[in-house]
Image (tube, rainbow, N blue to C red):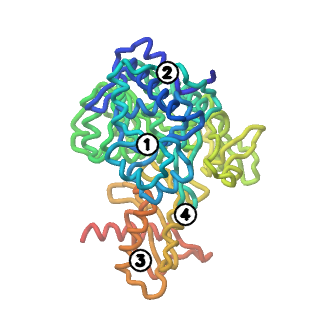
Amino acid sequence: MGKNIANLVTRHSQKSPHKCAITDGKTEITYGVWEAASNRFAGKLIEMGCQKGDRVVVLASKQTILMVGILGIFKAGCIHVPLDQKMPVNRLNKIITEIIPSVILTDQELLHLVRENVSKEVKIVLIEQLHPLITDSTVEEKDILPQIESEDIAYCIYTSGSTGDPKGVLIKHGSVIDFFEGTREFYDVDEDSRCVSFSPFHFDASVMDILFPLYQGAWLYLYSDVVLHELLFEVIKNNSVTHFAAFGSMLGLIAQTKEFHDVILKELKTILTGADVPDIKVIQKWLGKGENIKIINGYGPTEGTCACAAYIIRDRDPNRRELYPIGKPLKNAKLYLVDQHNQEIYDPEIPGELLIGGTHVMAGYWNREQENKERLVEFKGIICYKTGDICKYLADGNLFFLGRNDNEVNVGGYRINLNGIKQVINRLHWVENSEVVTIESKYGEKMLAAALMLANETSKYSALKQVKEHLNQELPQYMVPRQIVVMEKFPQLSSGKTDRKTLSSLLERELLASKAD
């Protein structure tokens, strides 16, 4: 049997069966009960006809009982496909039609949505049906579970695509375990740690802030209602949390709350951040919340198994002006910088595209042969993923992120292809052209904004109303621009191309003006 996450917590279930593994504030489960219940669910999936490699879609709210289902999916050798329960129906249909699941695991609230949009051949399991697997010890654990190999696919996480259509990233069992082994060298979670998860299951950061702490035998609080940032801080404080992960903008919003300034977090040891460039002032504020807090700036796209590089920040320096680097590769990842001629760059301060090699690299995109050819390339005799990220080496050997070579950005912890949003807008026949950019609110929050040029005599009011409805139907909420304006023409560079920098400034001023009215 190869390295796999089917045995994620087997050793902890044997060593500390009565220790609490997971709680969501309402329900908790021990390592021993979780292992046994997930074995039973894996057996149920196999009895239902599931085979190794079959896809199981999970469409449900974040809760303790759901972890029985997820671990059971891994144990059955199936591919875990977590989906955003708030995604538009059109997008959900596209994914389910493409992935062809054998089973959908959902809850009572979403049952009508699932039944209306999937074929009768797809079996449906309700979250509520998992409870007897925990409470009834007479339900047998099956001896028919398959052998899971390192090369078997563990999960498929959907990201935004360049055409506006979602694309599924396939990650192998062995890649996850190698990621864990590299992560434990800098993210010091152990059996005494108290962790909290803020990430939704359909976001690849959940591998880091849900699966990794449990792999290490920690206590984990699943927090699902990420709405009020005051509540996030309360969860950290009231549960004596020692470790948590949060993308940079979330750290910034929490740091703006009144209670943040009044409280010292004596138990807090380590914060893991990433997905967007961390704000220096925010990092310094968090470092001041305890005596020996360290913050890890992690880097890595979904295609590189969550993270493949890290930089540890320990020193408080209120006068710092330089952005933090993304660090050096994890032990099982290989990172290369190449120039436009695909020649490797070794010297500092020379920008190039970052390639990811090693066992972290995805198996590929689901049913995307052309994109696999474009993104997965051979370099130095191994398969590497072309990130599209432009980086440089610093004099000390750390990597520094400079930007993107395409139209992809990080907003709210999500990697979003702006061209994909633009294409969805341009499908409307009365839109002559559109541009999608990022802007910042007066609080420093990064958000998406769109500008439209209308064809013919289309009403401005009607256009704004219709484009918002169209985007809400076609895209997940995190891809819908918060600011949408109509313009007669876009600012241009001397080359005739849209001046995106000036456009962003105009839309920022428009946002501030609308808030002031």
Where is 4 relative to 171, above or below? above
Q: Amino acid at mark 1?
A: Ile
First-in-chain label (4 vs 3): 4
130 to the left or right of 94: left
In the rendered image, which residue does mark 2 sit on? 142
First-in-chain label (3 vs 2): 2
Q: CA distance from mark 4 to mark 2?
A: 48 Å
The residue tagged with tag 2: helix, strand or loop? loop
In the rendered image, which residue does mark 3 sit on? 486
Callout 4 touching callout 3 (CB < 8 Å): no
Residue closer to the observer: 437 or 288: 437
Q: Amino acid at mark 3?
A: Val
Give x and y (percent) for residue 85. Answer: 39, 49
In the rendered image, which residue does mark 1 sit on? 124
Which of the 4 quarters of the picture holds residue 161? bottom right
Q: CA distance from mark 3 to mark 2?
A: 61 Å
Q: Quadrant of the N terminus?
A: top right
Give x and y (percent) for residue 107. Answer: 35, 42
Mark 4, Cα crowd under 10 Å, few <14 / some 14-19 / many 20+, is: many
